[in-house]
Image (spheres, helix red, strand yellow):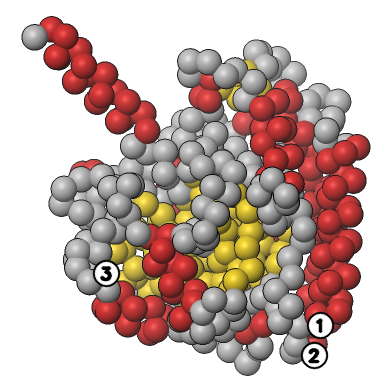
Amino acid sequence: MKCIKSYILTVISIFLIYSDVGACTTVIVSGRRTVDGRPLLFKQRDTPDFENRVVSFSDGKYSYIGIVNTKDTANLNVWGGHNSAGFAIMNSASYNINSEGDPDDENDVSGKIMKQALQSCKSLADFEQLLHSLPRPLHISSNFGVIDAFGGAAYYETNDEGYVKFDANDVNNAPLGYLIRTNFSFSGDRARDKGLSRFQAATELLYRASLTNSLSYDYLLNDVSRSLLHGITKVDLFKEAQKENAGSDFVAFRDYIPRYFTASVLVVQGVKADESPALTTSWITLGFPLVTPSIPVWVDSRHSLPTIFTADKSGKSRLNEWSLNLKKKVFPIERGEGSDYLNLTVLLSKNGEGIYQKLKPVNDKIFSESNGYIEKWRQSDALNTIELKKFYEWVDKYVSNVYSTQLK
């Protein structure tokens, strides 16, 4: 009997450790509250599937770009992206929306539905029709976030039987013009909420930006996805690293917005109602965000992408592999609870030579270079495929050089 009890406790412990692994932090911002009037979609993807790549698809009504697990060689699931109609989608797992409890990860079809939506949807209404058309039970426990080229921006808290919509353009749903979801649904059983620390941190960061009219794609990438502010303890590791009397190299690292299990970041910047949907931009951080730059991509007729994003001969993304190698330096303890302890001095050193400190000017240069092209394309209201190819070639060369010289 004691053996049976011990076995049950072990299984429960394993479940508690891993049940919250598929945890994401997500945000939708209405264009009415962003700096430039364009809606934003943000997903910090937390998953044990660390190896990811970016794929350009032409297998549906619309062409699209999405993040795919490397081991998914058939590209059956997409974990966020946008299409040629300016429609974008992402999700976060919800742990309180179905009555039976936590998501059934094995049978969950969220990735398949996001792929189907990117293939066929142009608007929020199209996505709603798709959800209505699917057979029940849906096998879903997801907060789907969607924006379109018509100014639409909403969450669909979706369970096995249907969904509840929360519109970011409705002041009753989003008085400040944005909505945040981590791993619970507002329409679910609030006693079973998960991801509260990350929700609290994101709430504080988004509120600050709303007060100063700073809600922008780069704020989400730089100040939210790479934030080291803990939502509950209020410890800010950026500030801790600057203290003269800083103690151990290692710090406890659990429930920050970037996590050990963060595998990618997606920020989709939509378009204004009078702009071409082709100008919709996906900013992708393919890997752990504190050691990986963010690079913009677009859906174009040539289905081109930076080569460092796509699968090489081994089937893996080079950028993703570079990021994983650097991540080992940040989390060098491989046994026991090593994933809960981050070597802060490797990221932020007193001499300014930490990985994150070296990464910041790289991000700034990519932002500056890409924004030059984006502004030109917006003036002509069209994507220039020749210039796009030139930018991708530049970013491939530049980032490859950075990882071989500065960040190795």
Front residue of 274 and 216: 274
Q: Identify residue type, mark 1.
A: Asn
Report the residue at 89% width, 61% height from top: 394
Q: In the rendering, at what x and y percent does residue 229 appear?
A: 56, 38
Q: Which residue is mark 2?
A: 380
Q: Quadrant of the C terminus?
A: top right
Q: Amino acid at mark 3?
A: Val
Q: Which residue is mark 1?
A: 384
User: Whole-Å distance between the Cαs marked 3 and 1?
Assistant: 39 Å
In three-dimensional space, the C-alpha distance between marks 2 and 3, rounded to whole angstroms, equals: 39 Å
- Dot 3 or dot 1, earlier in sequence: 3
Q: Amino acid at mark 2?
A: Ser
Q: Residue at x 54, y 47 (%)?
A: 71
Q: Where does label 3 land, which residue?
A: 164
| Numbered mark located on residue 82 in the image | none
* 2 and 1 marks in contact (CB < 8 Å): yes
Q: How many marks?
A: 3
Measured as percent of width and height from the top left, residue 60 is found at 51, 79
Q: Position of residue 374 (x, y in %)?
A: 78, 75
Q: Name the one closer to the observer, 178 or 12.
A: 12
